[in-house]
Amino acid sequence: MNAVDLLPIGEVARSTGVAVSAVRYYDEIGVINASARVGGKRRFDPDTVGRVSFIRRSQEAGFSLDEIRTILDETQGGWRGLVEDKLAELSERRDRLDTMINMLAEIRDCGCEAVASCPRAMPA
């Protein structure tokens, strides 16, 4: 790839909504890799934008950077077991969130003056 086609770190940051310091950190810990340095500054393949977006979404879902590194590691193949575990964990979390969302909606609509005395929030 031609150095002209590579993205500066600021462009990767803007395109993904993360801070430049986060992009730099991801590079330092190896979850992304700068393709080159031009004038001492990191340059990234355009595909890095998708990778950083994946990292960001994964972190928002509760993945650690070590887990993300395992999933993105193209040499180990250990990602499948981790993905299966995370699917189960995220499904359980979704179920708990759905339960809480439903309870909050019931509380909102029940007409009680205080949540602490609401029989829907505090069932016997």
Image: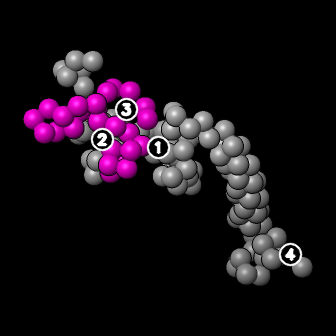
Which circle, 1 or 2, is nearer the viewer?
1
Question: Helix, strand or loop at disc 1?
Answer: helix
Q: Amino acid at mark 4?
A: Pro
Q: CA distance from mark 3 to mark 2?
A: 10 Å
Instruction: Return the disc, 1 or 4, that comes first in the chain's sequence.
Output: 1
**Marks 1 and 2, how far apart in space?**
12 Å
Q: Earlier in the sequence, mark 4 or mark 3?
A: 3
Report the Cα–Cα distance between label 1 and label 3: 10 Å
**Residue beneath label 2, please?**
13
For the N terminus, give its image quadrant: top left
Q: Amino acid at mark 3?
A: Thr
In the displayed structure image, the side of residue 30 where residue 82 appears, left or right? right
Q: Position of residue 11 (x, y in %)?
A: 25, 35
* In the image, farthest residue toward the left: 39
- Tell which tag, 4 or 3, sits nearer the viewer: 3
Answer whether residue 94 is visible to the viewer in this image: no
Residue drawn at the location 24% of the way across and 25% of the way down:
6
